């Protein structure tokens, strides 16, 4: 007998977006939070630099908007940018109310001369600098902002009587009623990994807060679960996805055989770190007058260019000219991680390479996070709001998570009373499948996918490489579809199925963009077109609901 769980709202994902939404909603509805690992796992936990917000009297909403638009290379939606930036102070206030302990100015008293004079409500918080920002506007908790945000919100969530959490549960697919004039979401199928059983969750609203898809690439700053599940589920349910070709590569991930996915925050460059070739030459000024503080697409491409030109494995990031006290106060986690690997960043340059970091495209949503399916929302990195355009500016992502989680919560609260339960969904059918005796197929296909995405759909693209990748992705999709219909689902199979689909969407979007813009750079069309346009993909079962 299949178990049915029933909640007003099911939130899939427990990063900044999902946690904020659940906590904001909990006074008004009973809420389930489903998370495929433990609650704190996800990109949020690993965020280092901080959250961009207009907090300094010398800064302004106009300036933050202008910087975001410039980094976004003509593709940001201006209304979304203003909507988000105008709410940045409120978003930070909310986090502070929850108990998030951001670094205060006095914690950095020996650094005061480097900071603008902050004023007004957030006068005593230290603001750091990152690429593309025309002033210091990144509020942070040393170099572990995500950990502090995540732990604070998770603690509040665990205590909440109206929120039930389901850790080690993986959402498989959204349940959609198609009998009504427009498709309506009524729940989600979920694999309970501990009991190896598929559960049916019935809900009035489902919210996808599943993060990005950077696991599509061999080298990434992201944790393991970043397999684009929300984007894939939304696409299969009938939602449009937008601008999937814009995959952000962070310029500086630690290059060391024992350091899996460890980021060196952009704030190191913000605080004066210089990028060097193995011979000690500083190269960024040759590529952009903003040098190390140019937007990420420019810095990552410059590093890629120098690595290919010289046949070197990495470049170096050097902040050793700052005092030991400054480095250990600002970057305690990076300092200790590097030291454990034999790199003393107070003395030595840090070896770094670019790695896949952020998915700018995603599920198309409106300003409340509503998707094309009635009662299905998407927030955070899994969504496409129009904020980031062709290149996300550093530290705008956590801001978007909080702002859109709160907008989606307000929209759900407003419709709760008038939203009816849909008829009972049909149960998950396992009668035609058996246990797999060939898991090697999954492991092999994971490796193959991530390698060809890195080689053919990476920082520098060509049409030929993209066509090669498209062909291979189609073969994998066929093989996985067959496997999926014959065997019981597992976490690895669910993720691989999603990642292969999302990779196909990335490739299709990249092939259709006949220009270079922001993060999408192709040797076949090296210049931007005169007019910028979004790449909108429509799933075969798309039916407009609004
Ligand atoms: P995540 O935090 O990734 O959470 C996704 C959640 O969904 C997880 O709980 C995951 O387990 C769950 N999930 C996924 N699929 C399923 C499924 N099928 N079923 C159940 N659960 C599922 N941005 C900034 O603004 N500032 C920074 O300083 C910054 N630093 C970063 C540093 C690193 C190393 C990385 C990787 C990213 C950084 N980013 C930063 C980007 C930012 O952290 C992310 O974009 C943001 O945290 C995404 O939040 P989210 O809530 O959308 O998703
Ligand atoms: C970083 O700290 O460099 C990451 C910031 C971000 O991705 O926004």
Image (spheres, rainbow, N blue to C red):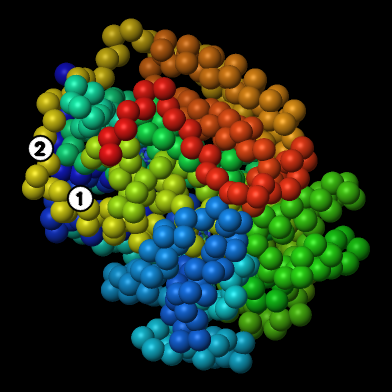
Q: Where 148 sits versus 527, above or below?
A: below
Residue drawn at x 69%, y 52% as measured from the top left: 354
Residue 426 appears in view: yes
- Residue 93, located in which quarter of the rendered image? bottom left
Local secondary structure at mark 2: loop
Residue 14 appears in view: no
Q: Where 269 sits versus 483, above or below?
A: below
Q: Which of 452/490 is in front?
A: 452
Residue drawn at x 53%, y 19% as measured from the top left: 477
State yes or no: discs 1 and 2 in contact (Cβ < 8 Å). Answer: no
Q: Please tell me how crowded label 2 is: few (under 14), some (14-19), or many (20+) other residues with Cα within 10 Å.
A: few
Q: Please tell me how crowded label 1 is: few (under 14), some (14-19), or many (20+) other residues with Cα within 10 Å.
A: many
Residue 423: x and y, percent? Answer: 12, 26
Local secondary structure at mark 1: helix
Q: Label 2, on which residue?
A: 420
Residue 412 - label: 1
């Amino acid at each position: 007998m299949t178990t049915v769980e029933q909640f007003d709202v099911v939130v899939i994902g427990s990063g900044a977006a999902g946690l904020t939404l659940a906590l904001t909603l909990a006074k008004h509805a009973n809420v389930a939070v489903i998370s495929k690992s433990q609650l704190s796992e996800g990109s949020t936990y690993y965020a280092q630099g901080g959250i961009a917000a207009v907090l300094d009297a010398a800064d302004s909403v106009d300036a933050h908007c202008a910087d975001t638009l410039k980094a976004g290379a003509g593709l940001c939606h201006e209304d979304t940018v203003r909507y988000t930036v105008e709410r940045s102070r409120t978003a930070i206030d909310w986090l502070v109310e929850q108990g998030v302990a951001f670094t205060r100015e006095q914690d950095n008293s020996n650094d005061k001369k480097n900071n603008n004079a902050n004023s007004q409500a957030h006068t005593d918080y230290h603001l750091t600098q990152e690429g593309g920002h025309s002033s210091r506007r990144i509020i942070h908790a040393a170099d572990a902002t995500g950990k502090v945000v995540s732990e604070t919100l998770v603690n509040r969530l665990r205590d909440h009587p109206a929120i039930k959490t389901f850790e080690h549960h993986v959402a498989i697919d959204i349940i959609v009623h198609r009998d009504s004039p427009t498709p309506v979401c009524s729940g989600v199928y979920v694999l309970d990994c501990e009991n190896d059983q598929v559960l049916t969750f019935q809900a009035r609203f489902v919210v996808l807060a599943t993060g990005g898809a950077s696991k599509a690439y061999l080298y990434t700053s992201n944790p393991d679960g970043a397999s684009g599940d929300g984007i894939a589920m939304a696409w299969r349910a009938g939602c449009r996805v937008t601008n999937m070709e814009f995959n952000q590569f962070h310029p500086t991930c630690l290059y060391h055989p024992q350091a899996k996915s460890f980021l060196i925050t952009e704030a190191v460059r913000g605080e004066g770190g210089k990028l060097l070739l193995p011979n000690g030459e500083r190269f960024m000024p040759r590529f952009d007058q903003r040098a190390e503080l140019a937007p990420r697409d420019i810095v990552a491409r410059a590093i890629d260019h120098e690595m290919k030109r010289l046949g070197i494995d990495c470049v170096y990031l050097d902040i050793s000219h700052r005092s030991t006290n400054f480095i250990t106060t600002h970057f305690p986690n990076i300092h200790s991680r590097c030291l454990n690997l034999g790199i003393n960043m107070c003395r030595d340059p840090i070896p770094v390479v670019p790695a896949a970091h952020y998915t700018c495209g995603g599920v198309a949503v409106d300003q409340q996070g509503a998707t094309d399916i009635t009662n299905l929302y998407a927030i955070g990195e899994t969504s496409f709001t129009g904020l980031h355009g062709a290149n996300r500016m550093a530290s705008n992502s956590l801001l978007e998570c909080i702002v859109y989680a709160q907008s989606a919560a307000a929209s759900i609260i407003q419709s709760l009373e008038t939203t009816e339960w849909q008829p009972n969904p049909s149960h998950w059918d396992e009668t035609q499948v058996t246990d797999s005796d060939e898991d090697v197929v999954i492991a092999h296909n994971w490796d193959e996918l991530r390698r060809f995405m890195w080689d053919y759909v990476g920082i520098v693209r060509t049409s030929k490489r993209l066509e090669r990748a498209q062909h291979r992705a189609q073969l994998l999709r066929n093989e996985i579809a067959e496997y999926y219909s014959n065997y019981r689902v597992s976490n690895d199979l669910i993720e691989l199925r999603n990642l292969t689909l999302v990779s196909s969407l990335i490739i299709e979007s990249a092939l259709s963009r006949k220009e270079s813009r922001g993060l999408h750079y192709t040797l076949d069309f090296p210049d931007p077109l005169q007019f910028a346009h979004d790449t909108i993909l429509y799933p075969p079962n798309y039916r407009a609901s609004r």
